[in-house]
Amino acid sequence: MPDTPDASPPPDGGYGWICVAACFLLNFSTWGAVASYGVYLSYYLTTNRFADASPLDFAFVGGFNFAFAMLVAPFVTSLTRRRGKYISMSIGIALQTTGYISAGFATRLWQLYLTHGVLVGVGIGFIYIPSLPILSQWFEARRSLANGLSSSGSGFGGALLAWVTGAIIDALGLRWALCITGVVTFALTTIATAVLRDRNRYIKPPQLALDLTLLARYDVLLLLAWSFISMLGYIVLLFSLSDFALSIGLLSQRATDVVGLLNIGTAIGRPLIGILSDKSSRLHVAGALTLVFSEVIALKLKRPESSRSYLYPQLFVALSYLAASGIMLELLRVKRRERRANEAQAAQMSITQESARE
């Protein structure tokens, strides 16, 4: 099916809403599946399935999903520019599916690292990276809303997959839970990839694998620092809540419910944040809300012998978001200064032109 023949500027609708639905399914099946890892983590930490593993090993397995998805980004971007998004995303679907299903048959720790960690993480990168810029090609005035609706897929996916995974583990065991996750994510990502359309033929994006010149910009460095530090806190919450619930005496089902409710909160909150961001400054919203390979750090900070074993991880999360908020406020100050400078320059040029005409 050919791409929809729209021209720039972004149409702010039309087939773009189909792309929103497609990206919703992609987020549901990639980051949503990753968001349910807390259920697997609590299972690994409370059983002896991998006798030679430590809690840090299981933290690294989950962390690899994020790390490898981002590490392959330059290569995936280059491949997408040369071969198109369908080739890249098809490779990702195959890798992610293989990772989940083969993880169900893992009997050694290194096999779990390779399957549930590396293969799933690389697969997500091949699926997610080509889809990331597409909604910005379709939306401008409603861009934050479109991205909010799309990213809410990870929240709904994390909630549903957490509850389903917990139920399947209790009823059928870990192997079936991982295999079913692989089949479900395969079906949804295949459908989403088939209907996803970009507007590259009109926009002609450079699709650079790595633009080092951006690292010379102070505002870009601030944005990267905000993303990095806020993700530290987010991943700790995402992966630790289930085990934290067990540590305070909740039953396994209640621990799974905690993970599901966290993801429901993100699913509802992200579209609302998108609406606020479209109507206000995106930097203002991000800075305010931030105020209100991290799981390894969290488990290292955990004190099992203490009555409040998760006190230090809780403090770590709070401090991460406080630091990220401070960085976003600094970015806001920089952008305000740039805007005032641009306005002053425009005013000076207007005065100069008026004088020349006189």
Image: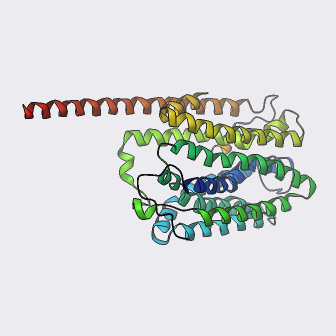
Examine the rendered structure and indicate whether residue 297 appears above or below residue 58. above
Which quarter of the figure has residue 179? bottom right
Name the residue nearer the viewer: 105 or 200: 200
Name the residue nearer the viewer: 52 or 283: 283
Residue under the point 72% across and 65% down: 187
Q: Position of residue 141 (x, y in %)?
A: 48, 42
Q: Is residue 116 visible?
A: yes
Looking at the image, which residue sits at the far left? 358
Task: Identify the image quadrant of the C terminus.
Answer: top left
Q: Position of residue 228 (x, y in %)?
A: 54, 42
In the figure, is residue 229 to the left or right of 236? left
Name the residue nearer the viewer: 328 or 185: 185
Count of marks, rendered view: 0
Residue under the point 75% across and 33% down: 310
Examine the rendered structure and indicate whether residue 146 appears above or below residue 344. below
Looking at the image, which residue sits at the far right? 171
Task: Identify the image quadrant of the N terminus.
Answer: bottom right
Q: Is residue 205 visible?
A: no
Name the residue nearer the viewer: 350 or 104: 350
Q: Position of residue 300 (x, y in %)?
A: 70, 40
Which quarter of the figure has residue 301? top right
Examine the rendered structure and indicate whether residue 178 appears above or below residue 152. below
Residue under the point 73% across and 38% down: 262
Residue under the point 68% across and 39% down: 268
Q: Position of residue 15 (x, y in %)?
A: 55, 57
Tell me which colouring the rendered structure shows: rainbow
In the figure, is residue 187 to the left or right of 284? right
